[in-house]
């Protein structure tokens, strides 16, 4: 009876050892959730009005490096390919993401202007990165549009397929938003107009659509927050100006005050019945002298 009792207890102890991985197995799986962080080396960049190329370091004033990192609890997630997905989530339709990793798939050859070829990095709106020690890096490059670019990276936990994401904002340019210049654009093929009711065989138009561009001191478009911020008028002093008028929606006359949308105020110039040269219109900010 004593021997039987000893055998049962020994068998139970052996079962406990096997269930706990005794005798040398793995240390068990981690069940900690994934977490992800994203940071930018520089979160403010100047406007790149000269189209300066992307780069790294002190000689790349219009570029910044972004670092993405993911952890499983307090340790790095496993490595692998195509682990991180990063994209331009909003804010700017200019500005691009770059790998700058030397991979030929992320470069293209272009003419160097001297009969040779040079490799330049390709620009992307979204990129995919592998995980090395739980992280990776990529680059953002500013263009000539001011604003705030939001960049988002995500990682998927393969155990439960949950997606974890992080974002960072990068401010491009410092602008006033106040009008500093205004200019007018006329379609080049509309340098001549016919008189009102003109039946000339050349079919010259008697109406021309025109646009005034309003920009601030950083060459960024200025929108009207409320009311008109652009004034346009027909300059007197020529025969062709007689009877001509400006039209924008329900507005009509020789002088109009208009709002600009994304820096553009649009109107039409209608000719009168008199012929002559030098029919001109002038645009200005209403508060300019």
Image: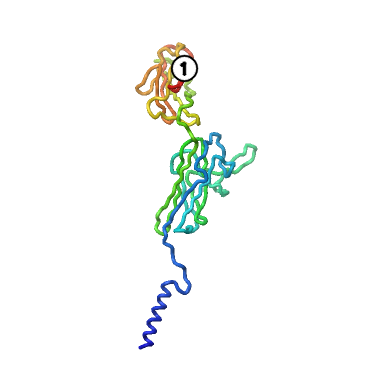
- Dot 1: within a 10 Å radius of its alpha carbon, few (fewer than 14), some, or many (20 or more) residues? some
Q: Position of residue 240 (x, y in %)?
A: 45, 13
Nearer the observer, 257 or 125: 257
Please say if 260 is above or below 138: above
Name the element at disc 1. loop
- Answer whether residue 198 is visible to the viewer in this image: no
Residue that label 1 marks = 280
- Label tally: 1
Farthest-out residue, bottom: 1
Assign the N terminus to one quadrant of the image: bottom left
Q: Quadrant of residue 272?
A: top left
Nearer the observer, 168 or 271: 168
Please say if 1 is above or below 231: below
The colour scheme used here is: rainbow
Please say if 87 is above or below 114: below
Q: Position of residue 101 (x, y in %)?
A: 56, 49
Residue under the image location 55 percent in, 48 percent down = 105
- Answer whether residue 41 is visible to the viewer in this image: yes
Residue under the image location 39 percent in, 84 percent down = 7
Q: Position of residue 270 (x, y in %)?
A: 41, 18
Q: Position of residue 118 (x, y in %)?
A: 61, 42
Nearer the observer, 119 or 155: 155
Q: Quadrant of residue 203?
A: top left
Residue under the image location 49 percent in, 23 percent down = 188
């Amino acid at each position: 009876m004593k021997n039987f009792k000893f055998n049962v207890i020994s068998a139970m102890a052996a079962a406990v050892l096997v269930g706990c991985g005794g005798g040398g197995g793995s240390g068990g799986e981690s069940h900690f959730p994934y977490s992800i962080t994203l940071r930018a080396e520089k979160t403010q960049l100047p406007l790149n009005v000269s189209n300066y190329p992307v780069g790294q370091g002190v000689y790349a004033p219009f570029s910044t490096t972004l670092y993405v990192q993911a952890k499983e609890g307090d340790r790095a997630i496993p490595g692998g390919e195509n682990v991180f997905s990063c994209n331009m989530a909003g804010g700017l339709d200019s500005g691009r993401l770059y790998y700058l990793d030397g991979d030929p798939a992320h470069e293209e050859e272009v003419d160097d202007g001297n009969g040779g070829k040079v490799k330049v990095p390709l620009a992307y709106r979204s990129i995919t990165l592998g995980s090395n020690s739980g992280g990776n890096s990529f680059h953002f490059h500013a263009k000539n549009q001011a604003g705030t670019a939001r960049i988002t990276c995500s990682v998927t936990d393969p155990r439960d397929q949950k997606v974890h994401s992080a974002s960072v904002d990068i401010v491009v340019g410092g602008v006033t938003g106040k009008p500093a210049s205004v200019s007018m654009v006329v379609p080049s093929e509309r340098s001549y107009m016919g008189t009102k009711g003109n039946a000339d065989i050349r079919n010259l138009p008697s109406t021309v659509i025109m646009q005034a561009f309003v920009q601030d001191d950083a060459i960024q478009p200025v929108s009207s927050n409320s009311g008109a911020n652009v004034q346009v008028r027909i300059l007197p002093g020529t025969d062709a100006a007689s009877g001509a008028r400006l039209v924008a929606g329900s507005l009509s006359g020789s002088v109009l005050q208009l709002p600009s949308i994304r820096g553009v105020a649009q109107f039409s110039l209608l000719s009168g019945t008199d012929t002559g040269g030098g029919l001109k219109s002038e645009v200005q900010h209403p508060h300019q002298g």
